[in-house]
């Protein structure tokens, strides 16, 4: 078994166990394996977060193909749908939300999400308990709601601007 497949199967096994037990912690018996394969909990959590965002971005790309009228609700539904499909990852990431290893990737993803959709994710919405309706209270569209302030990204000269991946570029509305 290669190094990458070992890491991949370790992440899958840990997330399956977290989803099965509902305990949002790395199982004690897996701690040594995680340290050996990833070098620590931070690198392991970063890999889980990367997987989460890759899955989210793939679904976001499909969503933006036919951009819905109410993008806020569509994004909240996308997030909650992914949380239902990958409960172990969401439980683990929610429990370690303040881990310093996750801060930079989360910040980058929020910026990309805002650029692609115009929606600023102020908080990471956790999957609601069963039976609780999913609202869009955690999603805000800057300058469209009363009292909201517009988000202005830092100004960069045109020569210094970075291009965004094609799947994040907004598509023009079709009539």
Image (cartoon, rainbow, N blue to C red):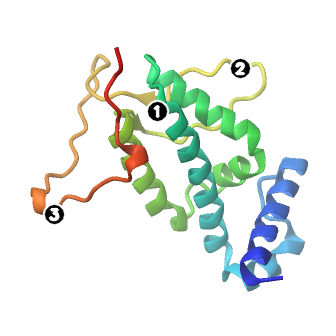
Mark 2 or 3: the one toward you: 3
Q: Quadrant of residue 71?
A: top left
Residue 14 as seen in the image, left or right of residue 40: right
Q: How far is disc 2 from disc 3 in space, using C-alphas?
A: 45 Å
Q: Which mark is residue 132?
A: 2
Residue 21 as seen in the image, left or right of residue 60: right
Residue 61 is situated, as x and y percent measured from the top left of the image, at 50, 40
Residue 2 is situated, as x and y percent measured from the top left of the image, at 78, 83
Q: Residue at x 90, y 49 (%)?
A: 20
Q: How far is disc 1 from disc 3 in space, using C-alphas?
A: 27 Å
Mark 3 surroundings: few (<14), some (14-19) or many (≥20) residues within 10 A: few
Pick the front one: 129 or 120: 120
The residue labelled by disc 3 is 160
Mark 1 or 3: the one toward you: 1
Residue 84 as seen in the image, left or right of residue 141: right
Mark 2 surroundings: few (<14), some (14-19) or many (≥20) residues within 10 A: few
Residue 110 is situated, as x and y percent measured from the top left of the image, at 42, 47
Q: Secondary structure at mark 1?
A: helix
- The C terminus appears in which quarter of the rendering? top left
Mark 2 or 1: the one toward you: 1
Q: Which mark is residue 64?
A: 1
Residue 42 as seen in the image, left or right of residue 170: right
The numbered mark, 1 or 3, whose residue comes first in the sequence reads 1
- Do residues under tags 1 and 3 come within 8 Å of each other at their CB atoms? no
Q: Residue at x 40, y 56 (%)?
A: 108
- Do residues under tags 2 and 1 come within 8 Å of each other at their CB atoms? no
Given the current orientation, which residue lies at the most extreme top position? 175
Residue 39, placed above or below residue 30:
below
């Amino acid at each position: 078994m290669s190094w990458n497949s070992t890491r991949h199967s370790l992440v899958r096994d840990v997330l399956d166990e977290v989803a099965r037990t509902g305990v949002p912690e790395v199982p004690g018996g897996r701690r040594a394996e995680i340290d050996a394969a990833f070098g620590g909990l931070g690198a392991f959590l970063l890999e889980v977060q990367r997987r989460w965002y890759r899955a989210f971005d793939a679904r976001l790309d499909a969503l933006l193909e036919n951009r819905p009228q109410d993008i806020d609700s569509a994004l909240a539904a996308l997030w909650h749908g992914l949380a239902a499909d990958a409960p172990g990852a969401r439980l683990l990431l929610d429990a370690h939300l303040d881990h310093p290893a996750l801060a930079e990737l989360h910040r980058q993803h929020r910026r990309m999400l805002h650029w692609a959709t115009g929606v600023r994710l102020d908080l990471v919405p956790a999957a609601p308990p069963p039976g609780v309706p999913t609202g869009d209270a955690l999603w805000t569209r800057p300058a469209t709601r009363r009292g909201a302030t517009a988000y202005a990204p830092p100004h960069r000269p045109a020569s210094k601007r970075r291009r965004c991946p094609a799947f994040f570029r907004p598509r023009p509305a079709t009539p």
